[in-house]
Image (spheres, rainbow, N blue to C red):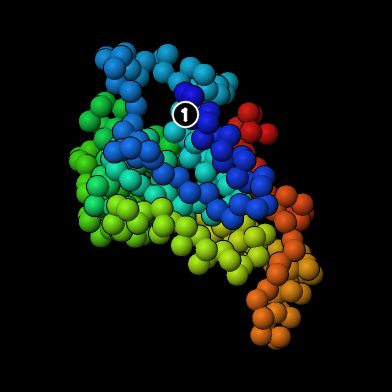
Amino acid sequence: MQMLEDMLDAIDLVNKNDNLKSLIITGNGKAFCAGADLSLGENTFDNGFDTKLSHEADFRRDAGGILALKIYNSLKPVIAASNGAAVGVGATMQLPADIRIATSNSRYGFVFAKRGIVPDGCASWFLPKIIGIPRALELCYSGRVINSDEALKLGLVDYLVEEDQLLDKAFALSDLYLNSSSPVSVAMTRHMIWSLSAEDSPENAHIIESKLINSRGASEDAKEGVMSFLEKRDAKFSNKISSDLPDDFPWRKSIFKADK
């Protein structure tokens, strides 16, 4: 569980540092993340699995889901740069990322049913939104491991690059998307698109958008955004995520006791 703790801490660090624009998740070595350690054999997934993690009144939260929700709740855009095999939680942890990049060495496997368990990491929520219900079911039913070409065709991956260009591409995309945009507006947009697209009606989206348009419209960033356009210069946004998030955020609250 040390890797999980380190990742949770790293995400917090990125979100609290106004000098960091995005969060890039990648692996070190031949694999991105090969999933759970199966060395315990038949007892791998028994009641002792993930014992360190959060417990609600009547269940133990899975480690992959805790990580996925931490990524989902990030205030900075998240880029998953998969350098190799991503199986089980290695695949599901990439789903909350805004951009997923792969190389020819990348592999993805939602192998849970082949191990007698079910998907973790909130994959039953994320995966159908990304590739559609029929394709999500096929990958999870079969548990087959797909290569990066198929992942790209399915929409599971957004970019396919050479192995030695993986991190360069991640940094380039971060610069392309974020260098000329307000960090606070990007943070709000990220949460709006992810959460409001799951609402039953567009009316709730309209309510949140209206409140945020009102608050952001009166911000220093909005003034700078307009004036930089009129004066034909690059914008210099001063609002910070650490201090200038709108009062209406967050508009959704965690249902888990440990996150309140």
**Dot 1: few (<14), some (14–19), or many (≥20) neighbours within 10 Å?**
few
In the displayed structure image, the side of residue 27 where residue 200 appears, left or right: right
Residue shown at 24%/52% (left/top)?
104
What is the quadrant of residue 149 in the picture? bottom left
What is the quadrant of residue 137 in the picture? top left
Of residues 15 and 113, the one nearer the viewer is: 15
Q: Looking at the image, can residue 220 be seen?
A: yes
Of residues 246 and 168, the one nearer the viewer is: 168
In the displayed structure image, the side of residue 19 where residue 48 appears, left or right: left
Residue shown at 73%/50% (left/top)?
242
Count of number-bearing discs = 1
Where residue 118 sits in the image (x, y, percent)? 33, 32
Q: Looking at the image, can residue 204 be seen?
A: no
Element on which disc 1 rests: helix
Of residues 129 and 78, the one nearer the viewer is: 78
Where residue 13 sits in the image (x, y, percent)? 62, 40
**Residue 96 higher or lower than 216, as above or below:** above
**Residue 16 higher or lower than 216, as above or below:** above
Residue shown at 35%/19% (left/top)?
45
Quadrant into which the C terminus falls: top right
Where residue 69 sits in the image (x, y, percent)? 52, 40
Identified by mark 1, the residue type is Met
In this figure, which residue is indicated by the disc labeled 1? 3
Where residue 141 sits in the image (x, y, percent)? 23, 39
Residue shown at 78%/67% (left/top)?
219
